[in-house]
Every structure is written in C-alpha cells, then in structure tokens.
Image (tube, rainbow, N blue to C red):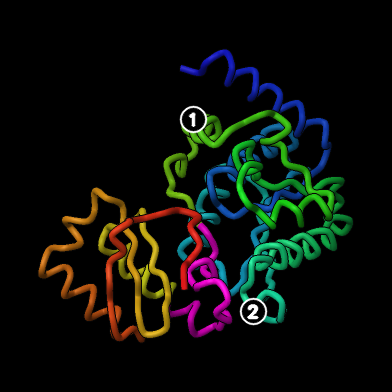
C-alpha cells in the first residue's frame, strides 16, 4: 500500500514532468531513470523519449535490460553512440573521470534536444545522490539537466518502492555502474580492460551472482559478492569452474574480496 507521503511525492513528480511538456530522459535502464521514463511516458506520451548511450563502458547485459524495460513501459526509446575512450581526460581515470563521462553524455543529448523537439533533458538523480561525491552531478548542472526525482524529494528507498508499486519489472534490480569503475583510480582505462571485466562479470552473472563486481588489477581479478553468496562461491567445484573461466578471459590470479560487494565503491590500487 502506498503511504500518504509517497503518494504526495508521486503526485509532485507527475506535475514536475507534465510541466516540462517534452523531455529527453537520460535512460540507463536502472531503477531511477526507469521511474522517470515511466512517468514521462505516462504524462507526456510521444513527447517523452528515452535515450540510452551505448559505449565501451556500458555493459551489454545492461543494454539488453534497458531495451526490454522500455518495451514493457511502451515508451519511445532510442540508442545513441559515444566513446569515452576518445577523451584523454577520461582515459587517465582520475577523480574527475565521471565528470568527463557525463559531460560527454550531456553534450551529446543537448545536441539532440532540438532535433527531437524536446524542451528539457532529465536524468535519474535522486535525493540521496546529492549527499555522495558525484562529479557527474556537477556536469549535469552545468548542462542544465533536470532531476525530477530530486524536485519531487524522492529518496533511493522511495524510488524503489515506487518502482514496485508501478509494476516495473526491474524494481529490485541491483545498482549498476559503468565498467570503468572496476579499474583502480589512476590506472589508464583501455578497451581490453573493459572487455575483460565485462566477460568476467558475465561469467559470474550466468552462475547466479547478481550483487557482485569484478575489479581489474592487471593480472588479478578481485571478486566482490554479497555476504550471503560467500559460502556458495567457495564451493570447490564452482570455485574451480569460475577460476578456470576467468583465466580464459585473461586473468592469471583470482581472489575474493573479504569485505564483499560494495555498490558504487571505487577500485583501490
């Protein structure tokens, strides 16, 4: 049952988006941007368009999920292509990496705003995100990106609850992050590293591990899984199977991080 507080926030969100009249939604397929796209489609119909940026840092498994959920919503959805590896400041992978990535994205979307006859660009930033160290939010503000979830005072837990109430199939989807976040800060990002991480995480995902990361440390793969998955990962046969497959994608040493899965965590050198 929806609480009075959440009902008020949902009503506010609907008003915020309706007042936009037309909007491009920076849609990754995550819960936050999915809720924005869902309400935008509900309120604006054909005047709402979800845009998903396809790049070497975006896992294909996330792309498949984004396309599927957009179809379920019935929203207009387009893919746009970009390549952050062409940006030297991004490749050097310093503390401003996300700023350079989001600047590239918002510049691309801003160039599509007029051709798509849209007045606004909206993202999936929620209220709790404002308390994090998020260089990408700085880029959003510089490009005039709207954050309807913030304007409606929706927190992370609000968004997840709302997604479930709206019947979104990805309401309990684990948090995702671009593949570059698996590479230690200060280590240059390459297409080879990104593909190796993606293949490694696909292997773990196929084995039923969903709350996980594979951090890339050269020849070492550092696996993070949720505390509840430690015992299963440590089963001898499964452990040997995963290790053998990770070696085939290019890792020489396989280790498990005893601190477990930490969504949004920065790889440590």
Secondary structure found at label 2: loop
Q: Is residue 37 visible?
A: no
Q: Position of residue 222 (x, y in %)?
A: 35, 70
Q: Magenta part of the protein: which range?
A: 177-196
Q: Is residue 158 left or right of residue 48?
A: left
Note whether 170 is above or below 204 in the view shown: above
Q: Is residue 120 left or right of residue 10?
A: right
Question: At x 34% / y 61%, what residue is drawn?
Answer: 224
Q: CA distance from mark 2 to mark 1?
A: 38 Å
Q: Is residue 122 left or right of residue 117?
A: left
Along the line of sight, which residue is nearer the eye, 247 or 98? 98
Which numbered circle lies on residue 250?
none
Look at the image and say whether residue 186 sits in the magenta stretch: yes
Note whether 98 is above or below 264 in the view shown: below
Which of the 4 quarters of the picture holds residue 11? top right
Question: At x 27% / y 72%, what residue is drawn?
Answer: 255
Q: Earlier in the sequence, mark 2 or mark 1?
A: 2
Note whether 75 is above or below 28 in the view shown: above
Number of marks in picture: 2
Badge 2 is on which residue? 92
Along the line of sight, which residue is nearer the eye, 129 or 158? 129
Q: Is residue 228 visible?
A: yes
Question: At x 58% / y 43%, what residue is drawn?
Answer: 32
Along the line of sight, which residue is nearer the eye, 207 or 194? 194
Question: At x 76% / y 57%, what residue is drawn?
Answer: 139
Along the line of sight, which residue is nearer the eye, 134 or 67? 134
Badge 1 is on which residue? 161
Mark 2 or 1: the one toward you: 2
């Amino acid at each position: 049952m929806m609480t009075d507080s959440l009902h008020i926030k949902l009503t506010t969100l609907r008003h915020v988006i309706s007042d936009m009249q037309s909007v491009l939604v920076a849609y990754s397929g995550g819960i936050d941007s999915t809720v924005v796209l869902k309400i935008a489609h509900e309120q604006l119909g054909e005047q709402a368009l979800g845009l998903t940026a396809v790049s070497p840092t975006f896992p294909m498994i996330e792309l498949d999920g984004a396309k599927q959920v957009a179809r379920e919503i019935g929203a207009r959805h387009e893919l746009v292509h970009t390549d952050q590896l062409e940006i030297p400041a991004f490749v050097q992978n310093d503390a401003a990496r996300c700023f350079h990535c989001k600047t590239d994205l918002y510049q691309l979307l801003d160039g599509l705003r007029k051709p798509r006859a849209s007045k606004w660009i909206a993202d999936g930033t929620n209220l709790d995100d404002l308390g994090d160290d998020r260089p990408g939010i700085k880029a959003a503000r510089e490009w005039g990106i709207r954050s309807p979830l913030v304007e409606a005072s929706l927190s992370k837990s609000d968004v997840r609850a709302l997604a479930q109430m709206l019947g979104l199939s990805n309401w309990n989807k684990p948090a995702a992050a671009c593949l570059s976040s698996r590479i230690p800060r200060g280590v240059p990002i390459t297409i080879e590293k990104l593909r190796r991480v993606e293949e490694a995480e696909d292997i773990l995902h196929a084995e039923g591990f969903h709350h996980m990361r594979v951090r890339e440390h050269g020849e070492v793969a550092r696996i993070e899984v949720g505390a509840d998955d430690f015992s299963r990962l440590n089963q001898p046969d499964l452990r040997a199977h995963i290790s053998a497959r990770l070696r085939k994608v290019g890792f020489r040493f396989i280790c498990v991080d005893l601190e477990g899965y930490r969504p949004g965590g920065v790889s440590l050198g």
